[in-house]
Image (cartoon, rainbow, N blue to C red):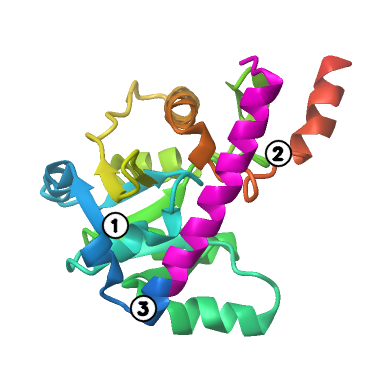
Amino acid sequence: EVYSEASKKGLAKGVQEHFVRNLVECFLQVAQPDHVRKTVTVQGIEHLDAALAKGNGVIALGAHIGNFVLVGARLGVEGYPFHTLFRIPSDPRIGTIICNYLPPRLHQRVIPSRPRRAAVRQILSALKRNEIVFILGDNLKKGKVQTLFFGQRVFSPRGPVSLALRSGAAVVPLYLIRNYQGGMELIIEPEICLTRNGRLSEDITQNTRHIVGYLENLIRRYPDQWNWLTVRMRSYQKEMVTGSNR
């Protein structure tokens, strides 16, 4: 989309303001584990309950939008078994904080995304127990499914779709945003029904493109709450240049 200079400045300011406010909310949650129950309303919990009633677990599809860190905290404080897939920094001290110190205060468990095979085993195990695994779908740094994201060619990971097709888990979109009144809302949308044509590779490609399209539309609704400070797409530039020269 084309934005005026004034719109760009306003959007950039909004992103920075939301980033700071979300950081403050995270600190408050760590200090007061019941904080989210008092400050975050929930819409659409029936969609999550309906998906869990199927008994195959739920892949909670999210993005770096709003305060995504507190999604699991809000559901976990209500007793939902919640896991977040997270890339652990190489510094072991930070890793210890993320894996051991923060989870009890954020009412969720962390599944390290590396090594990949161990992560897949933990995810499938959680889904088999009919639990929730939160995966951010806008980590579009590298992947095997070529698609378009805001008009740019990207290569999306096939993980969320592949795991859902493999396990039978429901894919339920959810996100925690700040509304126009300044309050925080966790919005849970109806399950995304995946296409199954019997050809796994085609099913993965088609459903992944559908999910990337959904995430793009979500970001269009809340552009100032998309955490551009976290989502980095620089790695595409070389791939796009290479592709354009073919």
User: Tag on residue 233?
Assistant: 2
How far separated are the C-alphas under marks 1 and 3? 18 Å
Evaluate if marks 1 and 3 touch, with contact meaning CB atoms under 8 Å apart. no
Q: Residue at x 33, y 61 (%)?
A: 72
Residue 121 appears in the picture as rendered: no
Callout in the foreground (1, 2): 2
Please report whichever mark, 2 or 3, sits nearer to the chain's N-terminal start.
Answer: 3
Residue 53 is inside the magenta segment:
no
Q: Report the residue marked by disc 1.
A: 132
What are the residue bounds of the magenta stretch?
Answer: 1-27
Please report whichever mark, 1 or 3, sits nearer to the chain's N-terminal start.
Answer: 3
Disc 1 element: strand
Disc 3 element: helix
Rendering coords of residue 39 (x, y %)? 26, 61
Q: Nearer the viewer, residue 66 or 117?
A: 66
Q: Residue at x 28, y 65 (%)?
A: 36
The amino acid on which the numbered mark 1 sits, given as a three-letter code, is Ile
Callout in the foreground (1, 3): 3
Q: Report the residue marked by disc 3.
A: 105
Disc 2 element: loop
